[in-house]
Image (cartoon, grey):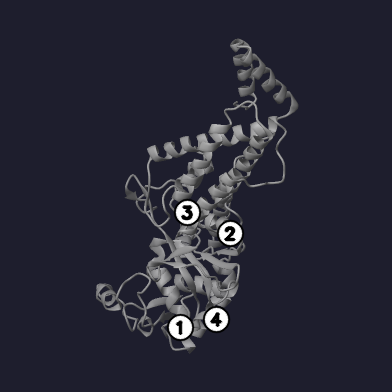
Amino acid sequence: MYIYNSLTNQKEEFKTIEQNKVKMYVCGPTVYNYIHIGNARPVIFFDVVKRYLEHRGYEVTYVSNITDVDDKIIKSAIENNVDEQTISEQFKKAFLNDAKNLNCVDYDMNPCVTDYMQKIIGYIEKLEKLGYAYEVDGDVYFSVTKITSYGNLSNQKIENLEIGSRITNHNKKRNPLDFTLWKKTDVGIQWDSPWGKGRPGWHTECVAMINDTLGELIDIHGGGSDLKFPHHENEIAQSQAVSQTNLANYWVHNGRLMIDDEKMSKSLGNFIEIKDFLSRYNFRVLRLLMLSTHYRQPLNYTFENVENIKNDLEKLESSYKQLQYKLDLNNHLRSQWIKDAFSNNIIEEFNKAMDDDFNTANGITTLMSLVKEVNKIIRKSVYTSEELDHLLSLYYTFNLLLNIFGINFDVPKLNQEIKQLIKKREEARTNKDFVTSDAIREILLKKGINI
């Protein structure tokens, strides 16, 4: 398996710190509003990463934080005349509900900043004692120039960053690039600290929570490409200062989601909230849309693209249903899965695609080749025992791939009444009694069965 590492800008063979175990952390939302479909791209993609790694036999511990203290939360609380916790709890629940509605597996942990405040303060104290942080009038800053490799993740030289930062006034800082670890404030929620009342800077939260939940070095750290600089760059700098590690062996970043070829963002007002999307489309549409393009590439959201994905899903669902119906009618739905040569080949092709830096687009191509085989064989009405075994193998292979993508279809088993209607319809068609055949088909359609 090879993963593109943003830190080295190349694909690298995936080797875990502990055998058959993966520690993965993905930056979560700042809970001051509902998340939009752009925010959902890392949520869906890394959900598929976890599912696939588990398919490959790894035990995955998946952590994603929730930032529940931030200037935006404080601003919203003031505007709504409530406390910060009321705002953060409301949108934390909304986010977790959105993730559930998108059929994402449960996170192993969702650490909140407010629950880790003492550990965050303790981490800043470590940085100060080691000489990487300094305090000025109750604010604490990190000395960026003490990290010689600073800028490696974002491919920027520190000299160029210094030139660009001179346009801003940084009276308190020793260097304009130095970032805030602790912010002295008398506005909004605050905590006691060795430097006075205040709240932490954004960049220390994740490092402190990763160290506490997963350790000083993890396998995969993920997030959107917009987090490379300064957030992830600053995480690495702090980890190098305290632990002499890059925090993660593999830094994985997904590309932006565009809308009609423009960046989607709340500041531009061109965003679509998850809850609004799901009021119009099935969650599978958004999942398949996100997976239809390689995760590192920008993804353009258009009405036409969404409708095309919707149509593709309907074809997938129809094939899957027909496959299950055929097995059901022949009483061949068994719990035992005996893979045949075709299914083994499909799974190998799928694994090959996903092992190449989680190429979900090629994985979907493999899934569609499976659908082509299913559509070919379900046209028959009479099967040999070998053909039924092949159908069953296709069925379990279909289930496997759909589950990794998180787009499983719920198809109820046929009851005896339905089976009898289908049998009568087949007899009518054999006898070329198409009036009866069409009438029974309409009855089945009303019962939700499309044969």
* Local secondary structure at mark 2: loop
Q: Which image quadrant for residue 391?
A: top right
Which badge, 2 or 4, is on the more N-terminal residue? 2
Q: Position of residue 361 (x, y in %)?
A: 44, 49
Disc 1 residue type (three-letter): Ala
Q: Amino acid at mark 2?
A: Arg
Q: CA distance from mark 2 to mark 4?
A: 38 Å
Residue bearing the label numbered 4:
122
Q: Secondary structure at mark 4?
A: helix
The numbered mark, 2 or 3, whose residue comes first in the sequence reads 2
In this orientation, does residue 96 appear? yes
Front-lying residue, 23 or 158: 23
Could you give the CA–CA distance between mark 1 and mark 2, rounded to whole angstroms?
35 Å
**What residue sits right under mark 3 in the picture?**
353
Nearest-to-viewer mark from 4 and 1? 1
Q: Position of residue 7 (x, y in %)?
A: 40, 71
Observer-side mark, 4 or 3, equals 3
Q: Nearer the viewer, residue 337 or 183?
A: 337
* Residue highlighted by disc 2: 56
Q: Quadrant of the C terminus?
A: top right
Q: Earlier in the sequence, mark 4 or mark 1?
A: 4
Q: Is residue 252 left or right of residue 390?
A: left
Kind of residue at disc 4? Gly
Q: Secondary structure at mark 3?
A: helix
Measure the alpha-carbon separation of dots 4 and 3.
Answer: 43 Å
Of labels 1 and 2, earlier in sequence is 2
Mark 1 residue element = helix
Query: Which marked residue is nearer to the observer: mark 1 or mark 2?
Result: 2
Circle 1 sits on which residue? Answer: 241
Residue 308, located in which quarter of the rendered image? top left
